[in-house]
Image (spheres, helix red, strand yellow):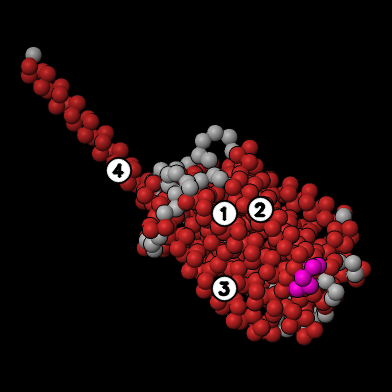
Amino acid sequence: MTEGPLFTKLIAFAIPLALSGILQLLFNSADLVVIGQFSKTGTESLAAVSSNNALINLIVNVSIGLSVGANVIMAHAIGANDFDRAQRTLHTSILLSIICGVVMGIIGVFMSHTFLVWMKTDPAVLEKATDYLGIYFMGTPANIVYNFGAAILRAKGDTKRPLIYLAAAGVLNVGLNLIFVIFAGLDVMGVALATIISQYLSMVLVLVALMREKGCCKLTWRKLAMKKRELLDIVRVGLPSGILNSFFAISNVIIQSSVNGFGAVVMAGNATGSSLEGYVYTSMNAVSSTATTFAGQNYGAKKYDRVNTVMWQCMLITTAISVVMGGAILLLGKPLAAIYSKDPAVIAFSVERNKIILPIYFVCGMVEILVGCLRGLNFAIAPMIPSFLCVCVFRIIWVYTAFKATPTTLVLYLSYPISWVLNIVIDAVLYAVFYRRLTRPSKAMLGYIKTAVYRRVRATETTSSETAICTESAL
């Protein structure tokens, strides 16, 4: 990552990462498709499963954000060839993921019903939604441990094995979905069980891979410990990332609550459109994670000029992804939505939703790239401020002003593209300022360098004069 041309390496790194993210999405998509097509109460069950998405993201995103911290700190250590620091980061990360997973899982299981009531979930689907969410959160430890383990492997440039593990888990998930729903008749509980079983499989596979590693990424259970320096660094980089992700999730929870007020059909259509959109976002986010890892390793190697190259090339890649994938979903909106549901009203609403969001989706991808590069450059807190203002605060204000004045889904969804445009303007300025600060020495540093050079020159001149005098004396 720190030598030679970058573009082909960025693509080679991002493709397996994108496919890994897409496979994770397939867990949820498989739930939606099986429920929508094979459940006796298709639309209601689809609405029950979909009503949980924003809430699941809100609860889990802080812990997932911490895995970004593990990735960045590990990349710094590898870039600097610091074996001991890499080992401490690895074992601190795995222990932290286990603790976070258990805590988040317990909170989710016991608070599922309360959370859904707070979100104004339609009473007609509340019981099913609670069943799904409670079981889903039992898989939270596996989900979080997997993401931390995969982040460690990606920090060293390995994106292929996490993809293979998710592929295996995805096949298992789809198979269990069909068995539990069609043959066992478990409905939403069946798809939830299939999801968590597949998540535990992916967790076991990634942990076994780390145990079999050689070098700085080898996991040894007896070495698990919270190392203060590494823990603080992971939290310093990762917690802002988690909070940043939570800003998106908080605004999405509020928007989902507004969507829930339109009834089960709109909820199901929103879920279908959101699931299709998710494939574009996940692919763009893979490029953002690529930018973070490459920027992190080059930051560790003190090759700051390469970070700027990473940023611009990743911008180009993410824009291409948005145009191609987003365009395909817009052109094939109806047949793609029909995979999820047979209800014409659900299909129509899914198509209308994505017509508002996808045309300008590339701006969202650019925001992710800028944030990813800032994290790699060790500026983790700065991106929080514009995202908090533009994504969280703006969308909340929009819901309680513009949407309240004109309560239509069109007005509700316009909050997304407007917030992205506001966000990218501020993030671009932040990146320029911080990159300039990093690559150009301060006045104080320039003064120090000039003084050091002056003293060195004076010392050389004095030595030369003394040598000349000694030579004349000798003659």
Foreground mark, 4 or 1, reads 1
- Sequence-wise first label, 2 or 4: 2
Residue 168 circle label:
2
Q: Is residue 183 magenta?
A: yes
Q: Amino acid at mark 3?
A: Gly
Question: What distance separates the C-alpha of mark 3 from that of mark 4?
Answer: 58 Å
Magenta segment boundaries in residue numbering: 181-186
Q: Which residue is mark 1?
A: 205
- Sequence-wise first label, 4 or 1: 1
Q: Amino acid at mark 2?
A: Ala
Foreground mark, 1 or 3, reads 1
Question: Horizontally, is 273 left or right of 385 in the view?
Answer: right
Q: Circles 2 and 1: CB distance less than 8 Å?
A: yes
Q: Position of residue 359 (x, y in %)?
A: 80, 57
Q: Position of residue 244 (x, y in %)?
A: 58, 66
Q: Residues within 10 Å of mark 2 (few under 14, many from 20)?
A: some
Whether 463 is drawn above or below 327: the answer is above
Q: Residue at x 40, y 52 (%)?
A: 87
Query: Nearest the camera: 204 or 271?
Result: 204
Q: Which residue is mark 4?
A: 451
